[in-house]
Image: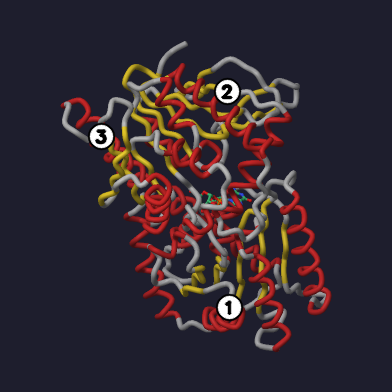
Amino acid sequence: MDRADLVVVANRLPVDRVVDTDGTETWRRSPGGLVTALEQVMAKTDGAWVGWGGKADLDIEPFDFEGTLLVPVPLSAEDLKYYYEGFSNGTIWPLYHDVIAAPVYRRSWWDAYVRVNRRFAEAAAEVADQEGFVWVQDYQLQLVPQMLRELRPDLTIGYFHHIPFPAYGLYSQLPWRRQVLEGLLGADVLGFQRVADAGNFQRSVRRIFKYPTRANEIEVPAGDGGSRSVIAAPFPISIDAQAFIELSQRPDIRARAVEIREQLGNPKKILLGVDRLDYTKGIRHRLKAFGELLDDGAVTVGEVALVQIASPSRPGVEAYQDLRDEIELTVGRINGDYDTMHHTAIRYLHQGFPREEMVALYLAADVMLITALRDGMNLVAKEYVAVRTDNRGVLVLSEFAGAADELTTALLVNPHDIDGMKDLILRAINMPEAEQSRRMRAMRRKVLENDVEAWGRSFMKAVDAVRNKRATGAPI
Ligand code: GDG
């Protein structure tokens, strides 16, 4: 097998399997954000990508896709149930999002997590070139850095954590808290979304292992009696802002934005929510605030419409099934109380849409509502801002989303404070254009300057610093 000097390891490969009308199976680039985020980094070298192919028991040989070697990792139905739906999304996801839902601690899930992480580490060890760089992605693979270091001490290893890292008081619940930290500390560079996430991680390391830390560096004892320094720092992820701007300029997409408003019955103000259907996103809180505004008579159906896209997510996990039921009951009640023959209060769509349609929705929306209870970054916030080239529109943004650290001129909201959220929604609906423009301009500057390419560059700069020090034999 060809070896690669840059290897990305992620839960999923960056492609989806598609079956043509004649029954032949091909691969298509997935629309996901991670793919675009890493595209520019990958384009510069002969890269490989290790990940699951998207179907249980799919066991196929590595293959080339548009210049990248894709290395499929087979996962059985049981692996998916225990490692993916179980430990990743039933234990780590809720624990790391401040226990919004109760994490479940099950030893059989942990065993599967260890087993599957080892499989990913072995696949990466096999494909990485001598002294190459391996970049591990996200919470499903926290043990891979250390496993990989043991297999291949010559490699430089990076890890990026897309979700929050919780405070020690919560993290310490995890029965395997030592093993997970050891796994992560196998990396040379650990990237987090916010300053607070990197800080929480460092504090957990200090509390559990007593390793000394200085600024972004952690001194980890090495086997030879010496030590090795691990960088743990914030690298806030971003979007391909230019690609979104280009879409927003397309005449067909602009026409579609106008059409969306017409199809909603030409309300004066369109409010929009776009989320994976996930309990971290605060969809229930948003609906509660909007429902109360209708009850109070502060907004009226026909004048204001809320469009809520809730893209289907993790349907195999019980908490997601319950959330869906709860949201659909609430939407049904509100619409039942307030819809007319011509207008709806909430246009709720439990569907995924092409990116073009998402951009048309962003263009149509006067107010974007992001009310996550906890969110690593929230790319939707940055996408909305990027496409508002006329500097109009209002972003209501949760303080608990990573994006709030950068988009400081959004209307920042505490989604737990329903009265506060109602006030802010009204303020957004009534905001004068001059104020919209002042706030939006500042946010657009941030997103355009700190796009995903800049994110990749800054992470790679930290990696190169480690590699250079190693090459010159200087202590890291
Ligand atoms: C995790 C972290 C962090 C959504 N529905 C559709 C669709 N989307 C796209 C959005 C956006 C992406 O999916 C969602 O990204 P978010 O950042 O909002 O949230 P998560 O999925 O939870 O992502 C998060 C992120 O990783 C990156 O590090 O920011 O905090 O939780 O790009 O536009 N895209 C299309 N159709 C849909 O129906 N085409």
Identify the mark nearer the N-term, 3 or 1.
1
Helix, strand or loop status at disc 1: loop
- Amino acid type, callout 3: Val
Left-right relation of 395 to 194: right
For the residue with label 2, is its CB less than 8 Å from the closest atom of ligand 1? no
Identify the mark nearer the N-term, 2 or 1.
2
Q: Is residue 212 visible?
A: yes
Q: Say the numbered circle drawn on residue 417.
A: 1
Frontmost residue, 335 versus 204: 204
Quickly name the residue at label 2: 72
View extreme (top): residue: 1
Instruction: Measure how far apart labels 2 and 1 are at the Cα level.
Output: 45 Å
Q: Say the numbered circle drawn on residue 352.
A: none
Rendered-image quadrant of the C terminus: top left
Q: Residues within 10 Å of mark 2 (few under 14, many from 20)?
A: many
Q: Residue at x 40, y 65 (%)?
A: 407
Quickly name the residue at label 3: 466
Left-right relation of 436 to 346: left
Q: Residue at x 81, y 77 (%)?
A: 340
- Amino acid type, callout 2: Pro
